[in-house]
Image (spheres, rainbow, N blue to C red):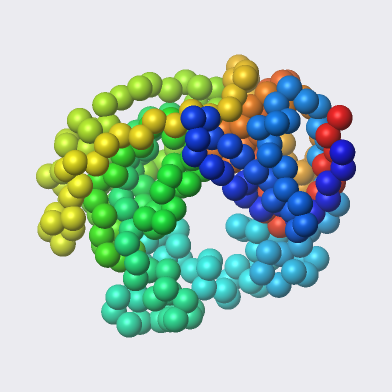
Amino acid sequence: MRYEGVLTKMRTELLETVQYYLVWDHDFINMNQLLDKKLSINFLRFECLNCGLQKKIFRQGYCYDCFNSIPQAGNWVISPELSKAHLDEEDRDLEFEKRSQLQPHVVYLANSSDVKVGVTRKTQIPTRWIDQGAHEAIEIVEVPNRYLAGITEVALKDHVSDKTNWRKMLTNEVLDLNLQEEREKLKEFIPAEAKDFYLANSKELEIKFPVLQFPKKIKTLNLAKNPFYEGVLKGIKAQYLIFEDGTVFNVRGHEGFVVEMNIF
């Protein structure tokens, strides 16, 4: 079967094993059904996810001009502590920023390789944890806006990492930890403004990914440098496709790439 379209991050569904879907303009693929099958990926051209023009992708699926102008790529997206909508101050588009920032956000612990702290909108749980390849995660606080979540994360990352070791995550060099205990250790470091939002009774969520074979050594596929690849799919974790020869392909890292995909 042949598919062609612009890549966007895989959609996910939390069942006993996470289900992954690659969504095209007029079709979709349940990627779990492709395990143990050979598929090819052929890079055809770029297409900015915002303006739709055939311009080189800069970051997050956007061309350089769009990345530096649209509200979806403001600095507060990566650094929530820079959020200003709660002060009625505009960054790029106040109406958009109010919709995005002035809603419940969660600060959490996720264990993908080692324990890390992170921030996401409440509506993005458990999607955010799946996208990070976390095999277990737990909520710490639920606050009413992105700014409070951001300053909480900043305070906690002095005591726990805010990064994922993606190589360890993909080779399954992971430890099972008691995240409720890890959360309790961090409670005293929560900023005063967020202490009342502590979630003392939240439970740890365990997540199982569809992986038949983890790679021992990793080779990353970059379509901008190597526009064609063919291999047997052996697993999916976070936003990565894992192939039999140890090649891993970050789908989210290739948003805005138009590809042809063949399934044999």
Residue 22: x, y in percent?
68, 46
Q: Quadrant of the N terminus?
A: top right
Residue 147: x, y in percent?
30, 65
> In the depicted view, which residue is nearer to us: 3 or 229?
3
- Residue 220 lies, with reference to residue 82, above or below; the image says above
- Residue 118 lies, with reference to residue 212, above or below; the image says below
Residue 249: x, y in percent?
68, 37
- For the point 39% across and 76% down, the residue is 98
Residue 2: x, y in percent?
87, 42
Left/right of residue 141 with respect to residue 127 in the rendered view:
left
Q: Is residue 257 visible?
A: no
Toward which corner of the image does residue 70 lie, by quadrant? bottom right
Number of numbered discs overlaid on the protein picture: 0
- For the point 65% across and 43% down, the residue is 21
Left/right of residue 56 with respect to residue 262 in the rendered view:
left
> In the depicted view, which residue is nearer to us: 226 or 108?
108
> In the depicted view, which residue is nearer to us: 183 or 12?
12
Q: Is residue 46 visible?
A: yes
Left/right of residue 25 with respect to residue 150 in the rendered view:
right
Q: Quadrant of the C terminus?
A: top right
Toward which corner of the image does residue 225 lie, by quadrant? top right
- For the point 59% across and 24% down, the residue is 211
- For the point 33% across and 58% down, the residue is 105
Farthest front residue?
Answer: 15
Toward which corner of the image does residue 193 lie, by quadrant? bottom left
